[in-house]
Image (spheres, helix red, strand yellow):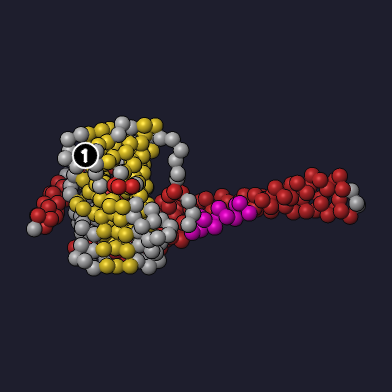
Amino acid sequence: MQGRSRELSRRFLLAGLALAILFSGGLPSGAQPVNSGEGFLVVVLLKTQIQIDRAKADIEAIDLQLKANELIIQDAERKLAIALETNNAQAGLGPGNDLRSARAARAKLKKTRSGLEEVRARAETTDAIVRNKLVPGQRLEADSLIIGMVSPDSGNAVVLKKDGKRIALKRGKPGFLESGDEVLAGSAGHDEVQVLDGRGMILLGARSRLKVEEDNPQEQVLRIAQGKLYAALDWPEDLERTFRGMSETSDEALNVILKKYQSLDRSEIMRLFGRNLKILIPAGVCTLRGKRIGIEIKNEGATEISMFEGTGEVSDPRDEKHLLVGENSVTVVTKDGISEPQRIGRIDKWWEKKD
């Protein structure tokens, strides 16, 4: 009942904000007010589109490098063939070295290109799924409770719905999250979750558990019960530039939705997308005010919090002790208290490692 009241309060607040924007002339004539589920999907769509564009540009740049590399290989092979024909071993040393270096560079470029193709393919899958959710426009009443999404390439993850239903995700199929849902990461690889109105990306380590505890106008509250996570957030101010850079699509219904967000000014973006992210851990609470953080639950519930960029505030469950963790600092939280932050030493960047 309490959760129901909170959800109704959130809807009334968002409706009030949308009306204020509408009467102030912030939205195009005839446009519908924004809603939270729609806003989440729009931000995910735009971030995905940026990912696709960057991957395409990087692939084009690598293709140019591969063409130049191929010319070097051909020239080295030609010189090496001449040296062999004339039995001039000395003349073949330089071209031989050039050929080995160029072939090694080609192999590296092709590997990088293959990785970019995978990134683009995953992003295009997400793009198609989110567009399908947004395009109907009128269907978003049912989707307005969407506050998170497990990436469609997280094939080993399981979503435990708040009603007890268990959904085993398959590759190509995302898991949309509502308040009270929990994500169980698979035993291999990393599972990606989009949160905080699309501004936040969380990578879960193997066998980690992440639950969406609460979603209100001030903050989104997540709980990590076991395992580890890496979180990267965008500043809400960055969304203004993202919205301004939106281009029209071939779908008119989608264009109507996107134009609503294109017309928002910075203050409106802050009101709609400027919430904090709070992460509950076994023996405390971490409120994120930075952009990148790592959290790992170790033995007996001890939790290591590493702040890579920005700051975070850590407090005990009773909210009696508060500690600010600065950039490039790490602290450990146990049932006995919170350690003083120390400079981060050697970092195991598990989130960047391939399966």
* Residue 30 visible here: no
Q: Please name whichever residue, 11 or 353, is drawn nearer the observer in this view of the structure.
A: 353
Residue 42 lies within the magenta run: no
Res 74 quadrant in image:
bottom right
Q: Main secondary structure of the magenta part?
A: helix
Residue at the image position 8 percent from the left and 58 percent from the top: 1
Q: Please name whichever residue, 41 or 310, is drawn nearer the observer in this view of the structure.
A: 310
The picture places residue 144, in percent across and down from the top left corner, at 21, 59
The picture places residue 326, in percent across and down from the top left corner, at 33, 32
The picture places residue 205, in percent across and down from the top left corner, at 38, 53
Residue at the image position 38 percent from the left and 61 percent from the top: 186
* Residue tagged 1: 316
The picture places residue 245, in percent across and down from the top left corner, at 37, 47
Residue at the image position 66 percent from the left and 51 percent from the top: 104
Span highlighted in magenta in the image: 107-118
Q: In the rendered image of this protein, does residue 268 appear above or below residue 322?
A: below
Q: Please name whichever residue, 112 or 296, is drawn nearer the observer in this view of the structure.
A: 296
Residues packed near mark 1 inside 10 Å, few (<14), some (14 to 19) or many (20 plus): many
Residue at the image position 21 percent from the left and 39 percent from the top: 316
The amino acid beneath tag 1 is Asp
Q: Please name whichever residue, 280 or 300, is drawn nearer the observer in this view of the structure.
A: 300
Residue 111 lies within the magenta run: yes
